[in-house]
Structure formats: structure tokens, C-alpha cells
Image: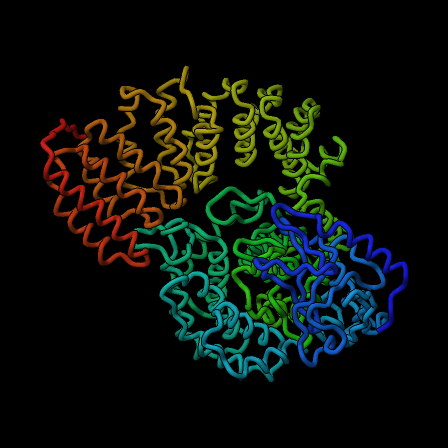
Amino acid sequence: MRESSLQLLALAAILALPFSALAAGKRAMPDFTRGDAIPAEAKHDWNLGPTGLREWMFCDKMATSDARQISVTKVERGSPADGVLAVGDVLLGVGGKLFWHDPRIELGRAITAAESAAGGGKLTMSGWRSGRTEEVVVKLPVQGSYSATAPFECEKSRRILKQGCMALAKRMEVPSEHEDPIVRSLNALALLASGDATYLPLVKREAEWASGFSADSMQTWHYGYVMIMLSEYVIATGDQSAMPGLRRLAMEAAKGQSAVGSWGHGFARPDGRLGGYGMMNSPGVPLTIGLVLARQAGVKDAAVEGAIERSAKVLRFFIGKGAIPYGDHHPWIENHDDNGKCGMAAVLFNLLGEAKGAEFFSRMSVASHGSERDTGHTGNFFNMLWAMPGVAQSGPNATGAWMNEFGGWAYDLSRRWDGAFAHQGPPEPENDSYEGWDCTGAFLLAYAMPLKKVCLTGKRPGMVPRLDATAAQALASDGRGWTAKDKHNAYNKFSDKQLLERLGSWSPVVRERAAMALGRRKDAPVSALVSLLDAPSLEARYGACQAIAQLRTRGAPAMEPLRRLLAEPDLWLRIKAAEALAAIGAPAMPAVPQLLELLAQIDPHTDPRGMQQRYLSFALFDEQDGMLGRSLDGVDRMALYKAVRVGLKSQDGRARGSIGSIFRNLSARDIKPLLPAIHQAVIEPAPSGEMFADSIRVEGLRLLADHGIEEGLTACVQYTRDQNPWESQVRTPELMKILLTYGTHAKAVIPELLKIADYFEKDEKDFPPELMALKAKSVRETILAIQATAATPKLTRLK
């Protein structure tokens, strides 16, 4: 150690001044040099690469860019930092400079530089202890530098893979029955992907475990990864002893798929619908990959074939439109990836031999880095896991560009001094859901890409054109200019011309960011946007629609060109034009007849899931933003009825739910012609969008009761029994109120109500007992009220 320069000390003193006063939101930034402690609620600390250190730094709004001090929270015995730094020491900078933009990135890049031949293994940091600031040197093993195409043709990547596999194998010698099946599967797969025969006995043991794996809950999350590992093992080794277990897993997964081709937290119910949140693509895409690999390994069955195709049909819709979303939702366009699902999709479509999907989602993966990769629902484990498999589909120049942009420093910061990898999590005060997960296998799969020993690391020939260095760098550039803390500033600095150019980007995310920036401008270039609606590029026309939608009523001059786009053959262009018209609002009302006509048109060949009906339902009927959400004045009733009848058959429960505004805005007389369609929508629920599917059914039941429709009585009882458990403790009292309006007619269903009360009280699975009791109480109280009533309303049958 040697004392730092006076200049460094002076700068440290200057930078320390605002620390005690700074606050982000409600959290104050501590100044450790003045005795402040790490906030009690901020439990998330970080692995500091192969130093053996863990440290805490300030974060705010999913970013560590405000931090300028780092507190050491742990020093592992025998590690490079042992004897050099101690718990409680404060790091103020690295490489002779104070932290100035983001300590996490600065430290990550400093580790990468120190491990190079030129760096000689010397990691120099500015440390503060007991009032003194000194430069300390942590000596790291020299690993070399990442190549321009890392992990391809990269000696450092080869060394990291070898060291990591050795560390992983040592840890796996004693299997842990408590380890998450996802982690266990990935760790075994990484050893298989290394191509080192030394590890085959370990992998075989894990394959035997996987062959017997089963789960009573959260099956969808686990089965996909277990199947991927087991299938890869069979394909790589030819060991047929694993086939019975693989076939069982594949058949359970295929038969557990919903009717539309999706999976949720668990398998589908007997009626083909999902419970709880409904569709969840984070487990669904790996399940599909697992089924494809199981088929390649030798599982041949029509159920597996059908499940693969149904899932692929769901996912194909998002090609060119955005990242794969959380569930059966709009394409995700805030970031280039969401929980790693674009990486998953790139791998899946490559395995299916579909170049268009593989190329688009690989591009999205390359453009997702930095703050985009740091995020993820419940944590960023999957976003990190699937990054490199997705990026690698575009070739070595793509992986090199992504590693230079983000992966190199992020991977090096996650790598422990023993060669294993730690889960870091997003920059949040609390740990995420994957705290403590061993991420060694997940990261080593990235370094194993050049070996191409398993399908996940490129054993199957790629379908995606290999990018040259310039194109790869351009994709990485497309992901810049956004952080969770500062989403707008970078795009606000662009000129109108630059933003208009970005509206024609291949990236739906870049288009949306440019559109939002134009929408924030007081003097937006409306005439240029109107002209862009007729551009030769389909992407530019999408972008123009997105920008006009951001202008709201200021986009009124675009109404007629937008109406012309409604006749275009491209489905997404029609949808984007409809959304822009809805955003314009009142000035665009002349387009309503055309939109109603479009909603009523069904084309199962070009639009098998009825996406036109889905998006037009939102554009027309959404209570807040729909063109008819608040008033139906002047709307032709016959055209409206025709559109509503089609909309009520939508696969998406949320789209059906938007039509509820019509129920509230039509008179009792005007709604009568729709009662049969409303009844049908109650007894035949939407097969997807389950989380949002209940409101329209409850509203429908209320309408049927208000109109004295006899069929509504049995429909209400049936729905009470079969409703989605999610929030059912709230809905059940509402349903009982509806049932009570049938008066003495409801006495006929009392026997069924008694069964339902018993079911709620004793037999319902996976539901909180106290909420079960509430539902049962509501049903029993309603039975007593029905027995006591003398009201006998007149009922009418629909048929």
C-alpha cells in the first residue's frame, strides 16, 4: 500500500461534502467517511469480481450511478483481498481516479483491465480507513483480455470456462436436494457443454435425478429447464436410460398446456384455461424449448407436436413488433428484452428452423444491455441467463460487441475468486427473488458457446445471418440512451431529423423512444409525420403511427392518411393506425364506422388468434382511452352489434373486458339484442387473459339478472364454482348479490350452492384458508336469504 496523492485527497474531500445532504426519493445517501452506516433496510450488496470482496453501494431507481463511495461488507479468507482490505473500509475510486459515473461499471471494467497481460493482475483502488485515503493493490491472476469476438477465439474465455467448471464440479460432488431445480439443471448442462468427458459421471448422476423429477406446484418453471438438460444429455451421449423420464416430463408438459398454447405458474385446468395470472411466457418459452429438444432426443407423440406448434403460433406474433411480454399482452417496447425472453425466443426459433424469428429476437438480445439487462420481474436472473444464447445466434461479432458494451465487465464483476459465479441481482436496496442462487452454470454456458457441444450453445447450425463488426456495433448502439433512472434525456437531445430517422428503425423500442420524444415537443413536426405514413419502409410507417399517437389531438391532420392505412394488407400497420386514431380522439370520430367494420372482420388464416379484434376492441371500447368508451351517441346500432358480437368471442379476457363500457353506455332497450352474445361470453370464458377475464363475466351476469334472463341463474351458479381463484374472495359476494335478485327462482339451485359452500370451506386447493372461509360464509348467508325471500321476479328465456 502507498498513500495517495494530495490531489486525490483533495478531490475526495470535495466529493464527500454533498453526501450527507444528498437524498434520492426518501432514501438518503450515506457518507461513510463521516461515520454514516449502511441503511438497515438496504440489504443488497455486491460481489466484487475475483477479489474475494463483497461491498455495498448506494442505488436509486434501478441505478448505481449516483454512488461515489463503496463500503466493504465481506472479505473472504484466503482471497486476493484478504489482508489488503477489511470490512468497513470505504472505496472511493479505482485506477487512480475517484468514482465519477457509476462505481459498478468502473470497478467491473477495472477488473477486466487488471486481468489483462498489460494490467499484470494489479487492481488499484482508492481506499479510506480511519480518516486516511490510500491506494491499495489487490493482486489478481492474469486471465488475458477478451477478444473482439469473445467468447469466440478468446483465451480468457477458455480459461474462465475451465476454472469455472472445476469449481462447479467440486461443489457438485455432494448433491444438494434443496437446490432449485432450475439451478441444478443449468449447472449440469454447463458441465455437459464443456465437452470434458471427466464430468460425464457427474452429469449422468444429475440426469438420473432429472429423470425422476416431478413437482406438485410451479411445475412449469421447473419442467422446462429439467427437460432441456435431460434432452441435451440424451442427444450428446445417446444414453437411452433417461428416455422414460424424459418422455413422462414431455407428456405432462404438453398436456398441461392451455388451449391457446400457453402455460402459467402451473399447468392448465381441465377446461384448458390457466388459473391465477394466466399466461406467463418466462416459463412457457423454456418449456417449448424443452419439448423441441425432447422431440429431437426421440420423444415422438402428437401431443408434443401440437404443443410445440401452438406455442410457436403464440410467439410468432411478436416478431418485428417487440420483446416477448410477460403474458398474453401487447409486445413489450420499453426495453429490448424482458426477463430474457427474447434470448429464449431466438434459441427456440433457431431450433425450429425459422430464420425470421431467430434473427429478430437475436437482434433484440444484442441491443439489450446495461440498465435494460439489470431489470427483470422478481429479479434479473433470467435476463442474464438468456442474454448470450440469444446474442450468439448473430455470430461472433455480435457477441464481441455485446461483451464490450456490457457483458465483459458484468460477467467479471459476478465471477468469484474461486471461479464460480454469484447472482448479483438488480440495483435495488433489497435482494431479489434469486438471492443465493448459484449462477455458475448460467454464466459458464455463455463461455461454452464456441465449443458447440450442446444445442443450447450452438450444436445445431445457425439460421441467423452472421453480423459483421459494423452491424453488430450498430445494434449495440440501438440499446443506448435509456436507463431506469433517466428514460428521456438522451432522446430529448436529438433533433427532429434524428428522431424522424429513428422512427424507421428496425427496433420497435427505438421507434417508441423516438415517438415519445416527439410527443414531448411543443412544436412537433406534424407534416413530416403525415408524410412518413406513406414511406416505402413498413417500419417507418409503424413509427409514424406511434409518434402521431403520442401527439394525441395534435395529430388530427393525420386522420385521413391513417384511415387509408386501415385498408393496408399488413395487420400490424392496421392496428397501429387504429391506435393512432383512438389517441387523436374526437377529431378522428369519422373513422368509427370503418373501425367497427374492421373489428367485425375475421380472418383465421392471416390472423389466427384474432389480434385485429383484440386491439380494435381496446381502441374503440376502452373506458378511458377508447373512442366509444364514454359515449355511443350517433353510432349505428347494427354496426355496433355486429362488432360487439365478434369482440365478445375474443381469445383475450382483457379485450372482452373492454367491451364492458358498451354494457354501461347502452340503454336497457338497446342492449337486449346483445343478451344472447353476453350470455355466451359468460358460459364460454376467454381462453386467455385469465387475470382480466372475470370483470366482463360478472358484468354480463348482472345484466342477465337485471333483464330477468332465466339462463343467467344457472350460469351464475356455475361461474361461482368454476371462477378463477384469483381475487375470488372479492367476486363471490358480488355473485351472491346477483343470484339473490332471482328471488324464489334461486331456491332451485340451493343444493348446488350447499356443495359450493362445502367446497370453499373444505376442499379448495392452494387458496388461503381464511379466504376460503369468507367465500363459504358468503354462500351460506345467501342460501338463508334465498330461503327467506318472497320476491318472484318474472323470468324470460333466451331461447
Residue 413, can we see it? yes
Q: Residue 448, located in which quarter of the rendered image?
A: bottom right
Quarter the C terminus occupies = top left
Q: Position of residue 670 (x, y in %)?
A: 30, 20
Quarter the N terminus occupies = bottom right
Q: Position of residue 88 (x, y in %)?
A: 69, 68
Left or right, 290 with respect to 359, comes to left
Residue at 46 percent of width and 46 percent of height: 328
- Between 293 and 339, the residue placed more toward the observer is 339
Residue at 45 percent of width and 54 percent of height: 309
Q: Position of residue 477 (x, y in %)?
A: 73, 48
- Between 339 and 734, the residue placed more toward the observer is 734
- Between 351 and 638, the residue placed more toward the observer is 638
Please tell me how many numbered marks the rendered image carries. 0
Q: Position of residue 190 (x, y in %)?
A: 59, 73
- Colour treatment of the image: rainbow
Left or right, 244 with respect to 113, comes to left
Left or right, 101 with respect to 38, comes to right
User: Residue at the top extreme?
Assistant: 634
Residue at 68 percent of width and 59 percent of height: 36
* Image position of 54 with respect to 15: above or below: below
Residue 353, can we see it? no
Residue at 70 percent of width and 48 percent of height: 22
